[in-house]
Amino acid sequence: MAKIEYLVNGAVGRRKTAVARVYVKEGTGVMTINGRDLTNYFPSPLLQYVVNQPINALNLAGKYDFKVNLCGGGFNGQAEALRLAIARAFVKIDAETKSALKAAGFLTRDARVVERKKPGQPKARKRFQFSKR
């Protein structure tokens, strides 16, 4: 069995609780996410656009194949985690693409996560109604 030669082995992107690992090889532009096609995994055109932003910014559509492992989070967090992972993979392939991707904001890790619920409160910040008497 022939071993697949990847250009990038496991560039990682995270957003909220979603984690995306990307494996890149030269090819025809096929993106497989958890064994499914991109349009099948993300039916929304907006989420497909978010995923393809770094590819379109560098005009590299149709030059690389992507194998993606996605876990955790929701659709939006997974799409943004995948965008970060793809951008990091392109920087590993060619370091000169870093300035263009950084200027577009694709290399910034969005660290915002849901705040935890505190004991004795209904939500993270909300309090129960105060009664003086």
Image (cartoon, grey):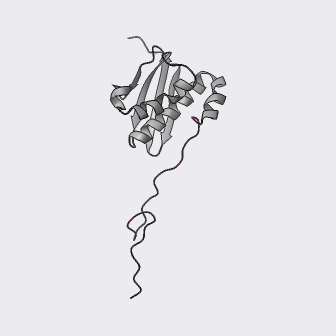
Q: Is residue 127 magenta?
A: no
Q: Which quarter of the rendered picture does the C terminus lie within?
A: bottom left
- Magenta stretch, residue numbers: 106-125
Q: Main secondary structure of the magenta part?
A: loop
Image spot of residue 57 (x, y percent): 57, 26
Answer left or right for 105 relative to 118: right
Residue at the location (53% across, 23% down)?
Answer: 8
Image spot of residue 69 (x, y percent): 41, 31
Residue sitting at the far bottom: 133
In which image quadrant can residue 70 be found? Answer: top left
Residue at the location (50% across, 33% down)?
Answer: 83
Q: Is residue 124 magenta?
A: yes
Image spot of residue 73 (x, y percent): 40, 43
Q: Which quarter of the rendered picture does the N terminus lie within?
A: top left
Residue sitting at the far front: 45
Residue at the location (48% across, 37% down)?
Answer: 81
